[in-house]
Image (cartoon, rainbow, N blue to C red):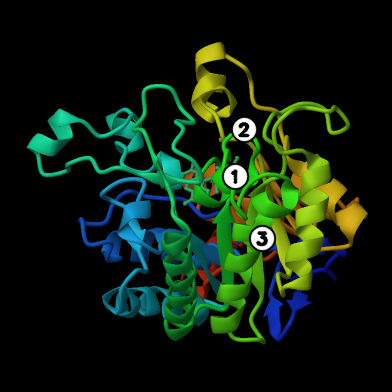
């Protein structure tokens, strides 16, 4: 039977506000593009998210939930723009919690990257072919009327009145997420989407209070954080996902675009408004800084390539961080936590590959030698098979 468990930070609980994360593993938000045009969660989403809770992830985050249909990436996006979205999301949250996981939700508006094809349909802007099958394009909104990606739809600059309504949309999204019973909420402000289009000087050309220097460019992000905090219960943690840098250059380079120093300023301001953790991603504001460009140029991903950003923000500001991006196994995740680079780790594609990632990480770190973390209806059999042994 089990020896005493060696210390593993990955499996040490963490408390933020009134919520205790049972372990440090978070399933990263991942859009499935699998809803009908109504944004309602289906059984696909239920089984997709449910299996990660069965697989031992301490926190399972939904994909981006759209706060206003103009901000959909695709017609298949999940929504939280109406009360009708709440019940199926509640069913998912309750199942995740029944398995001992926290249920997290992410609020989203795609901004200039709205109105596009699903990845496997080309990931380009919607056009005539899609219109012919009932998925007509619409004009996206952004900080400015400037395309961030060549060949995509020309966005329209949001008016100040529209920004006022957007703040209400985010507030309503937060209220609905609370009604659905989620424990944790994340605001998606990364990857070239709406909030990022305001933050970044390479996308924001406004000359009003929402543009100009960093204070103006941060204004929307901070107002959204405030609007969400008002509606999101005080005892539940709020995360904020940013692209920590616009260009994947060295941390100390004076790159144009949003820089790591800008992220320090933003993290402090967000924390002052009740944001509890910075979810540290990068890139996406321009085509040349997207994963598709990596594929085109055959640039290889490196393990943990965004971890230095989580580390820098945590060290400089003292605000807790979550690291994400090519974190492939438990030992790598444990090393990130042990070296103080982040407080939580989020796993995306590797949980698609292995929904039992967290349970396998526990085994690799020696904290579950006898399958006790597994649901008993699986673990009992697997432990017995281990004990009996299988001849070569
Ligand atoms: C299928 C898929 C969908 C994604 N959808 C979202 C999303 O809804 N919101 C978001 O913030 N990031 C999204 N991402 C980015 C992931 O959350 C994560 O940051 C990224 O995949 C890097 O982590 P990984 O290397 O562990 O996959 C998505 C990634 C994938 C692979």
Q: Earlier in the sequence, mark 3 or mark 1?
A: 3
The residue that appears at 30% across and 65% down in the rendered structure is: 41
Q: Eyeballing the image, is 32 above or below 303?
A: below
Give percent across and percent down for residue 297: 56, 12
Decide if residue 45 is on the left or right side of residue 126.
right
Give percent across and percent down for residue 284: 56, 35
Quadrant of the rendering where the C terminus is positioned: top right
Residue 325: quarter of image: top right
Residue 202's disc number = 2
Decide if residue 383 is on the left or right side of residue 178.
right
Q: Eyeballing the image, is 376 above or below 381?
A: below
Give percent across and percent down for residue 220: 59, 59
Q: Earlier in the sequence, mark 3 or mark 2?
A: 3
The residue that appears at 65% across and 26% down in the rendered structure is: 301
Q: Which residue is mark 1?
A: 207
Q: Which residue is mark 3?
A: 25
Disc 3 versus disc 2: nearer the observer: 2
Quadrant of the rendering where the N terminus is positioned: bottom right
In-front residue for pair 334/26: 26
Most extreme residue toward the top is: 297
The residue that appears at 57% across and 14% down in the rendered structure is: 298
Task: Indicate yes or no: mark 1 CB to ligand 1 under 8 Å.
Answer: no
SS category of the residue bearing label 2: loop
Give percent across and percent down for residue 288: 56, 22
Most extreme residue toward the left is: 132
Q: In whole angstroms, how far apart are the C-alphas of marks 3 and 2?
A: 33 Å
Q: In whole angstroms, how far apart are the C-alphas of marks 1 and 2?
A: 14 Å
- Mark yes or no: residue 59 visible: no
């Amino acid at each position: 039977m089990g020896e005493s468990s060696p210390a593993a930070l990955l499996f040490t609980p963490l408390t933020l506000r009134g919520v205790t994360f049972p372990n440090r593993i978070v399933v990263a938000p991942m859009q499935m593009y699998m809803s009908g045009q109504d944004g309602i969660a289906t059984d696909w989403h239920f089984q997709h998210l449910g299996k990660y809770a069965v697989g031992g992830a301490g926190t399972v985050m939904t994909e981006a939930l759209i706060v206003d249909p103009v901000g959909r990436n695709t017609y298949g996006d999940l929504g939280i723009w109406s009360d009708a979205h709440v019940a199926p999301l509640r069913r998912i949250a309750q199942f995740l919690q029944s398995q001992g996981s926290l249920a997290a939700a992410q609020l989203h508006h795609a901004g200039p990257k709205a109105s596009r094809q699903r990845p496997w349909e080309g990931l380009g802007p919607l056009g005539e072919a899609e219109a012919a099958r009932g998925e007509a394009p619409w004009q996206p909104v952004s900080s400015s009327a400037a395309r961030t990606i060549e060949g995509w739809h020309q966005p329209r600059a949001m008016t100040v009145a529209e920004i006022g309504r957007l703040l209400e949309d985010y507030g309503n999204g937060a209220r609905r997420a609370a009604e659905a019973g989620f424990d944790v909420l994340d605001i998606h402000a990364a990857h070239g989407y709406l909030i990022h289009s305001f933050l970044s000087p390479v996308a924001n050309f406004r000359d009003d209070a929402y543009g100009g220097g960093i204070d103006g460019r941060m204004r929307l992000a901070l107002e959204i954080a405030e609007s969400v905090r008002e509606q999101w219960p005080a005892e539940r943690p709020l995360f904020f996902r940013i692209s920590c840098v616009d260009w994947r250059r060295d941390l100390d380079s004076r790159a144009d675009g949003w820089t790591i120093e800008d992220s320090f300023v933003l993290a402090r301001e967000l924390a002052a408004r009740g944001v509890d953790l910075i979810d540290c991603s990068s890139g996406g504001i321009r085509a040349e800084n997207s994963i598709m460009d990596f594929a085109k140029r055959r640039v290889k991903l490196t393990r943990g390539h965004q971890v230095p950003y989580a580390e820098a923000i945590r060290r400089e500001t003292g605000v807790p961080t979550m690291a994400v991006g090519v974190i492939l196994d438990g030992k790598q995740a444990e090393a990130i936590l042990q070296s103080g680079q982040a407080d939580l780790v989020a796993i995306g594609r590797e949980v698609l590959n292995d929904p039992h990632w967290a349970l396998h990480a526990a085994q690799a770190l020696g904290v579950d030698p006898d399958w006790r973390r597994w649901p008993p209806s699986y673990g009992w059999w697997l432990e017995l098979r281990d004990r009996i042994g299988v001849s070569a």
